Every structure is written in C-alpha cells, then in structure tokens.
Image (tube, grey):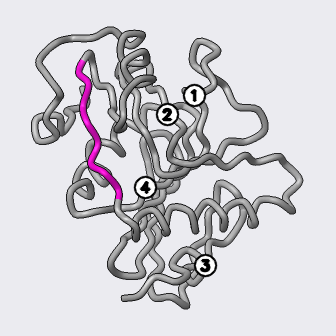
Amino acid sequence: MVLITSILRKPRSNKIYTHEEYLRFEEKAHNKNEFYKGLIIPMAGAKATHNEISANVVSTLKNAVRPLKNIYRVYTSDQKIRIDSEDTTVYPDALVICEKPEFWNSREDVIINPLVIVEVLSKSTQNYDRGEKFMLYQRLPSLKEYVVIEQHTPLVESWYQIEENTWQKTTAHGTEGKLSLRSLGVTLRLDEVYEHIAF
C-alpha cells in the first residue's frame, strides 16, 4: 500500500468524495487539487521560476521528439493523470505519451498512459515528488521514466525502469549538462531546461 503525504498535505476537508465528484469539483475550482482515495488535496501554487522551467522543459521535449519515427505527444501541467489502482488523480508538470493518448472514461483531461512524467521540484513539494508521488506513479503500467528538475540549482535526475520494480537513476548537473532520456532516445540539454533562469 502506498502512503500518501496527505498527512502533511492537508485535504480540504475530511469529507470523502467519489472520483466523479472530484472531477466536477475541479471543473469549478480556481486552484488545482489532487485526489487521493476520496480526499481532495489542494496543490501549492507555482511561482514564476517554476512556471518558466516547466515551459522550458515542455518546449525542449517537443523539439527533441519531433524528428523521431514514433509520434510522441507532450502535455503541460493542466493534464491530469489517473492511477486507478490507487484511486488517485494527480497533476504532473509535464508528461509524454507515445502515439495515442488513452483517456480515463473518455475524459480528455485525464490520461492513463504516460510514458515519461516530469516534475519541477519546489521546497514545499520536493519530498512528495521524490517520495510518495513517485511511488504512486510507479503503479502506472505505461510509465518508463520519471524526471525531476531542481529549481534553484541546475540539476536534473531521471529514474528509468530497467525491469519491473527496478529503476535506475541518472543525474546531470550544471547548465552545460545533458541527460539521456532512454525511454525516448533523446538528450535533454540543461541549458535549454534552465534558459533565462538565474542562479
């Protein structure tokens, strides 16, 4: 069983919602919320540096996969991911799928087949992103690579699934660094990820 940091990331209330109720709630919400086993958990608001890095990585990924033989689709942080086995729905900062997206119950705002997931770390979310959220993501049969990006220093880490339940970590640092994304067969350049970011 995966333990969630909802203990630390307080839910909006102790009321238990169905997933469908959460989706209706989210359609009207002014701020993003994640869903974990009936609880609606508010997300911390992202600031300018986080948002710029997120935009940079989406742009960098789109440029990197464009020449490839397979069709890869890159999505932004508005795309929810559903993890059915954990009754959980979360927002990544970016994700990549191969060929056609698979949607939960035909809802185009909820994807179930990410190949690569990217999270931009912040002080308030880094433990969750590196820990429980990654554990949740590992329940996705389609996921092959998980990438986390530091905000305040040029450091990017990747966990690549080399076999079931076995993930291999690779690290790149410095704005001259490069990180091989093995699931895609492309290289992520840190100078592009951190374009216009001052350290």
| Residue identifier under label 3 | 192
The amino acid type, in three-letter code, at marker 4 is Glu
Crowding at mark 3 (Cα within 10 Å: few <14, some 14-19, many 20+): some
Distance of label 2 from label 3 (alpha carbons): 25 Å
**Is residue 162 something that shows in the picture?**
no
Distance of label 4 from label 3 (alpha carbons): 16 Å
Q: Quadrant of residue 148 in the image? A: bottom left
| Residue identifier under label 4 | 119
129 is higher (above) or lower (below) than 191: above
Q: Do the residues labelled 4 and 1 touch (CB within 8 Å)?
A: no
| Residue identifier under label 1 | 109
Quadrant location of the N terminus in the rendered image: top left
SS state under label 4: strand
Residue 189 numbered mark, or none = none
Camera-side residue of 27 and 7: 27
Position in image of residue 95 (x %, y %): 57, 47
The stretch in magenta equals: 39-46
SS state under label 2: strand
The amino acid type, in three-letter code, at marker 1 is Asp
* Residue 103 left/right relative to 14: right
| Residue identifier under label 2 | 80
